[in-house]
Image (tube, rainbow, N blue to C red):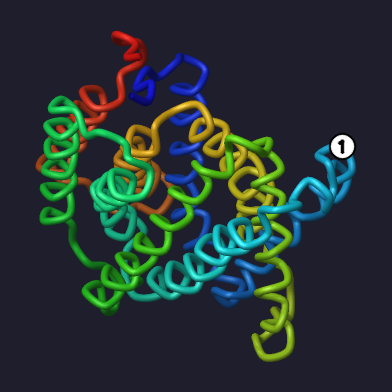
Amino acid sequence: MPNTRLAWPAFFALVAATLLWGGSFIAMKIAMRGFSPLLVVFCRMALASLVFALLWRRLGGFRAAKGDWVGLVFMAFCEPCLYFVFEANALTFTQASQAAMVTALLPLLTAVAAAFFLKEKLEASSVAGLTLAVAGVAVMSASGQATEEAPQPVLGNFLEFVAMCCAVGYIVTAKRLAARHHPLYLTAVQSFTGTVFFAPVLFFAPLPETLALGPTLAVAFLGFGVTFVAYGLYNYGVSRAPAAKAAAFINLIPVFACLLARVMLDEALTPAQWAGGFIALGGVAITSRPGGKKRA
């Protein structure tokens, strides 16, 4: 039976990744004040690719992908390619906090996919924790209020749901590939593929006349802090944890996103949202706590 223990390094890597991803929703909102949505995605992919280009030979180059091209391409096509097509558009219709709340569905979708494709067994505590976390996020979502920057929240939240379906394909495939590839190598493949995939936006997306400081810094954060660091940390965590447990940390994203959105975007948090956030944190603690008895 697969080992279900979660080590502390993987735990902290996954928490840090979700903190950065929570911040990415706010950064996307700020970046879109000066750039078109898909142009933001291309820029963040290109910036991360510049860093990986310097590390490419040390990571093994193209020869390291021998025998795994289909899996690597499928992983990158799911995320960042399709994932960001849907998420970038979702954030034009809904609040950053509401879109982040939809990510709570990802652990449940991943748990089912991991049980089917990776033969991972769902523990009773994991099911209970996931249910509690989703309930907490549901409370946060139901308590959210639309703003002027969220003209069609229902459509935006649906597009974010489709993005989560794409993310399932990424997580399950990355878990399989992590047995043979360094986490940074997987992240590099995602960045290079995303850069090529989104490059055509340069021919039809409107380019900004001036580079405003806030949106430009937000793009830089998305490229280096999120696409480079966060994906690297998450791929590291996925390589050392069951896919379902790693996906459970996604429930932290709406909590971090709501807190950051309140501070940086002035999106109000109601008492019910605070309560839902703590419930979600409790669910993640039950589902993904480090340690535990190792199974043979």
- Spot occupied by residue 266 in the image (x, y as percentages of width and height): 35, 52
Q: Please give the residue where the numbered disc 1 appears in the rendered image.
A: 58
Where does residue 243 sit, x and y in percent of width and height? 39, 38
Say which residue appears at 26% left-offset and 78% top-offset.
Answer: 155
Whether 211 is drawn above or below 275: the answer is below
Q: Locate the C terminus by quadrant.
A: top left
Residue plotted at (29% across, 49% down): 116
Where's the N terminus, which quadrant? top left
Image location of residue 172, percent across then percent down:
43, 49
- Depth order, front residue of 75/202: 75
Task: Please say whether residue 236 is visible from this viewpoint.
Answer: yes
Residue 258 visible in the picture? no
In the picture shown, does residue 287 fall above or below 206? Answer: above
Q: Nearer the viewer, residue 152 or 9?
A: 9
Which amino acid type is marked by label 1?
Arg
Q: Quadrant of residue 49?
A: bottom right
Residue 13, horizontal then vertical, whole percent: 52, 27
Q: Most extreme residue toward the bottom, as rendered?
A: 204
Secondary structure state at the residue bearing disc 1 = loop
In this rendered view, identify the residue nearer to me: 235 or 61: 61
Which residue is rendered at x = 73% and y = 81% of the image?
209
